[in-house]
C-alpha cells in the first residue's frame, strides 16, 4: 500500500534540517556527483512520480547514495514516509553496529534531507524553486505544502525564496536552462537579486540513458552561478521507477 505520511504523523527530524551539512555537500558537488553519490531532485507517488517513498529509500541504499532529498511538488508527505522508513531501517540494523564488524562491512543508509519543489513567478515566467533542509512545520512553508500551486503574492519567486530561508532552508532554482520564455542569463541574476542560495547546475535536459548532465547547459549555468556566488546542486528529476533516470 502506498505510504504518504502527513506532517503530523511523526516528529520532526533535526538531521534532515541540517542546512550547514547540506551546504557543505553542495559546495563539493561536481558533474560526477549524481546520480550514484547524491540525488537532490526526485519525485514519488505523493506528487507525480511512480516510486513509493519506501521504494526510493530501498533504491538509494542499493545504489549506495550518500545523501538525497525527495522534492515532491508542493508536498512533504513523501519525505515523511521516507524518513519513517529510514528510522525503522536504522532500528532493524542497530544490532549490527554493536558488533565487531568494521565500518566497511556494515550496511549503510544515506542522509535524507527535507525537500520540496515549488512553482513560482520570476520575470513573468513560471519557474520551479527547490527547497532543502527547511522545517516543514514552519508557518511560512504551509502555503506551499498543500498539494497545489499558490496564487497571489505567495506565488512570487521572491516570497518563495524568503519563505524557504525563513524556515531554515536553502532555496535553489531548478533546471535554469529549461524555461522557454527566459534564458538562464535572465533568470539566474534575477533569482540572485532575491537572495537565492543556489542553482541546479548539473541537469540532464534531454533525458539521456545513462543519465549525464548536459555539457553545454552545465557550462553556461556553472559560469553564471560562479558570477553570483551561488551553490551548485544536481539531481535526476526522477518521475519514473528508476532513480538513475528522469523518466
Image (cartoon, grey):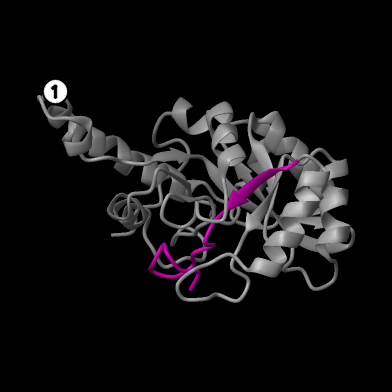
Residue depicted at 72% across the width and 53% down the height: 222
Q: Position of residue 109 (x, y in %)?
A: 31, 41
- Residue pointed to by mark 1: 98
Most frequent secondary structure within the magenta stretch? loop
Q: Is residue 81 left or right of residue 230?
A: left
Q: Position of residue 217 (x, y in %)?
A: 71, 66
- Quarter of the image containing the N terminus? bottom left
**Residues drawn in magenta:** 230-247
- Comparing 112 with 160, the one in front is 112
Residue depicted at 65% across the width and 67% down the height: 215
Image height of 100 relative to 72, above or below: above
In the rendered image, the residue lying farthest to the left is 100
Q: How many numbered marks are there?
A: 1
Residue depicted at 45% across the width and 59% down the height: 44
- Comparing 186 with 151, the one in front is 186
Q: Is residue 63 left or right of residue 104?
A: right
Residue depicted at 38% across the width and 40% down the height: 83
Q: Position of residue 13 (x, y in %)?
A: 44, 29
Magenta span contains residue 124: no
Q: Residues within 10 Å of mark 1 (few under 14, many from 20)?
A: few
Image height of 181 relative to 68, above or below: below
Q: Element type at marker 1? A: helix
Image height of 214 relative to 154, above or below: below
Magenta span contains residue 244: yes
Residue 134 seen in the figure: no
Q: Is residue 151 left or right of residue 210?
A: right
Q: Quadrant of residue 176?
A: bottom right
Residue 107 seen in the figure: yes
Q: Position of residue 86 (x, y in %)?
A: 31, 40
Amino acid at each position: 500500500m502506498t505510504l504518504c505520511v502527513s506532517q503530523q504523523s511523526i516528529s520532526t527530524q533535526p538531521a534532515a534540517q541540517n542546512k550547514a551539512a547540506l551546504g557543505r555537500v553542495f559546495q563539493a558537488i561536481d558533474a560526477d556527483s549524481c546520480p550514484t553519490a547524491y540525488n537532490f531532485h526526485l519525485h514519488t507517488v505523493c506528487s507525480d512520480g511512480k516510486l513509493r517513498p519506501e521504494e526510493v529509500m530501498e533504491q538509494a541504499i542499493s545504489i549506495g547514495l550518500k545523501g538525497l532529498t525527495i522534492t515532491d511538488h508542493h508536498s512533504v508527505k513523501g519525505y515523511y514516509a521516507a524518513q519513517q522508513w529510514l528510522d525503522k531501517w536504522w532500528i532493524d540494523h542497530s544490532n549490527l553496529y554493536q558488533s565487531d564488524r568494521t565500518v566497511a562491512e556494515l550496511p549503510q543508509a544515506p542522509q535524507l534531507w527535507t525537500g520540496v519543489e515549488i512553482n513560482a513567478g520570476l520575470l513573468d515566467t513560471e519557474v520551479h524553486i527547490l527547497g532543502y533542509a527547511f522545517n516543514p512545520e514552519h508557518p511560512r512553508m504551509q502555503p506551499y505544502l498543500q498539494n497545489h500551486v499558490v496564487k497571489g503574492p505567495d506565488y512570487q519567486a521572491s516570497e518563495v525564496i524568503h519563505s524557504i530561508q525563513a524556515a531554515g532552508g536553502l532555496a535553489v532554482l531548478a533546471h535554469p536552462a529549461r524555461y522557454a520564455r527566459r534564458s538562464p542569463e535572465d533568470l539566474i541574476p534575477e533569482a540572485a537579486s532575491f537572495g537565492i542560495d543556489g542553482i541546479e547546475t548539473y541537469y540532464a535536459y534531454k533525458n539521456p540513458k545513462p543519465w549525464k548532465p548536459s555539457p553545454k547547459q552545465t557550462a553556461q549555468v556553472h559560469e553564471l552561478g560562479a558570477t553570483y556566488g551561488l551553490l551548485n546542486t544536481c539531481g535526476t528529476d526522477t518521475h519514473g521507477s528508476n532513480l538513475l533516470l528522469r523518466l
